[in-house]
Amino acid sequence: MPYVVTESCIRCKYMDCVEVCPVDCFYVGENMLVIHPDECIDCGVCEPECPAEAILPDSDPQGEAFLQLNRDYSTQWPNITRKGTPPADADEWKGVPNKLKDHFSSNPGTPD
């Protein structure tokens, strides 16, 4: 049961989760993070660290919907091992629903 990042991360990208991951399974996009599901060891330490509550187990219905997105982009985006600087407007995007359709960027990010 790997954990996945859901659309709540889009445009928030706080990255607190990256600091606690013991296996460095986070990958960075332009405006969100993803978890490589085959690298995740299901420890769950990242879930409570996310201020946007964007990390869920893939067994959760909302998490299951994002499993493939996490799988696909974790093979395309660079690995991130340290917390970077979140977007200046991250707090404004926290809690905004339905961000995937209009605000998701498939572009890779850069680890800070």
Image: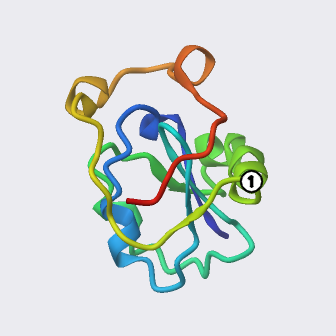
Name the foreground residue: 64 vs 29: 29
- What is the quadrant of the N terminus in the image? bottom right
User: In the displayed structure, would residue 109 be above or below residue 95?
Assistant: below
Residue at image position (60%, 51%) is: 60
Q: How many marks?
A: 1
Mark 1 lies on residue: 76
Residue 57 is drawn in which quadrant? bottom right
Q: Residue at x 35, y 56 (%)?
A: 15
Residue 43 horizontal/vertical position (percent): 50, 80
**Rendered-image quadrant of the C terminus:** bottom left
Residue nearest the viewer, comparing 35 with 59: 35
State how the image is colored: rainbow
Q: Quadrant of residue 47?
A: bottom left
Q: Which one is nearer the viewer's eye here, 61 or 45? A: 45
Location of residue 100 (image quadrant): top right
SS of the residue at dot 1?
loop
Question: Pointer 1: residues within 10 angstroms few (<14), some, or many (20+)?
Answer: some
Q: Residue at x 61, y 48 (%)?
A: 63
The amino acid on which the numbered mark 1 sits, given as a three-letter code, is: Gln
